[in-house]
């Protein structure tokens, strides 16, 4: 079994700097790297040593909640992380209308019309990962590009 990789002080500090992009300043989790560039958060009662021992004995594939994908320059929050950290998310949020929300919930990308492009430009939006919001609810994570909003809604969470 591959060893579980815990993220310690310097690595967690780098993650926290990236999370400031969304306005997040506190992360009450033990961070664990799982798979390529994926970070999970654990809040259980097991100590790190106990988790390592369990991994040696029975093998642990996953532990904790999948929080984000760690790219070299930014983080993309997972669907679950948005809800776990929603009270802290204050930046890089884009709001959508009724039709766009339905398209997003169906898992489709949203093509931007000129009116949307102008609105985002006026609001000073930059391209990159964003949290998509409809009225008072966060819907998920997206990537804003010049001409569309790329959807990262997990397949199992999409409307049919």
Image (spheres, rainbow, N blue to C red):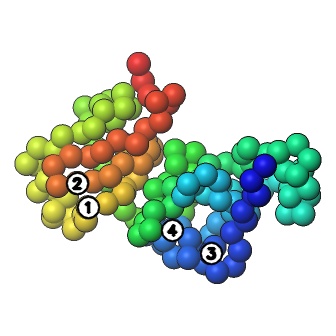
Q: Position of residue 26 (x, y in %)?
A: 62, 70
**Image quadrant in which the C terminus is located:** top left
Q: CA distance from mark 2 to mark 3?
A: 29 Å
The correct choice, above or below, for 30 with respect to 114 in the image is: below
Q: CA distance from mark 3 to mark 4?
A: 13 Å
Q: Is residue 43 left or right of residue 49?
A: left
Q: Residue at x 74, y 48 (%)?
A: 63
Outermost residue, left side: 114
Callouts 2 and 4 close, C-beta under 8 Å: no
Q: Position of residue 97 (x, y in %)?
A: 26, 39
Which mark is on residue 11?
3
Q: Is residue 108 left or right of residue 38?
A: left
Q: Position of residue 8 (x, y in %)?
A: 71, 74
Q: Secondary structure at mark 3?
A: helix
Label 2 sits on residue: 145
Q: Position of residue 84 (x, y in %)?
A: 61, 51
Label 4 sits on residue: 19
Query: Can residue 53 be seen from the camera position used here?
Result: yes
Q: Residue at x 73, y 44 (%)?
A: 61
The correct choice, above or below, for 28 with respect to 112 in the image is: below
Badge 3, how many Cα within 10 Å: few under 14, some, many 20+? few
Label 1 sits on residue: 127
Q: Mark 3 or mark 1: which comes first in sequence?
A: 3
Q: Residue at x 92, y 47 (%)?
A: 57
Badge 2, how many Cα within 10 Å: few under 14, some, many 20+? some
Q: Residue at x 54, y 58 (%)?
A: 37
């Amino acid at each position: 079994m591959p060893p579980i990789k815990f993220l310690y002080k310097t690595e967690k500090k780098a993650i926290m700097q990236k999370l400031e992009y969304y306005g997040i300043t506190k992360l009450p989790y033990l961070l664990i790297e799982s798979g390529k560039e994926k970070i999970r958060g654990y809040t259980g009662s097991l100590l790190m040593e106990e988790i390592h021992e369990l991994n040696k004995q029975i093998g642990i594939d996953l532990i904790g909640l999948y929080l984000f994908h760690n790219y070299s320059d930014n983080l993309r929050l997972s669907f679950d992380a948005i809800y776990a950290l929603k009270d802290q998310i204050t930046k890089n949020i884009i709001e959508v209308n009724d039709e766009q929300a339905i398209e997003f919930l169906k898992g489709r990308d949203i093509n931007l019309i000129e009116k949307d492009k102008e609105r985002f430009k006026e609001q000073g939006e930059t391209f990159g990962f964003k949290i998509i919001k409809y009225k008072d609810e966060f819907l998920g994570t997206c990537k804003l590009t010049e001409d569309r909003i790329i959807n990262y809604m997990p397949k199992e969470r999409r409307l049919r």
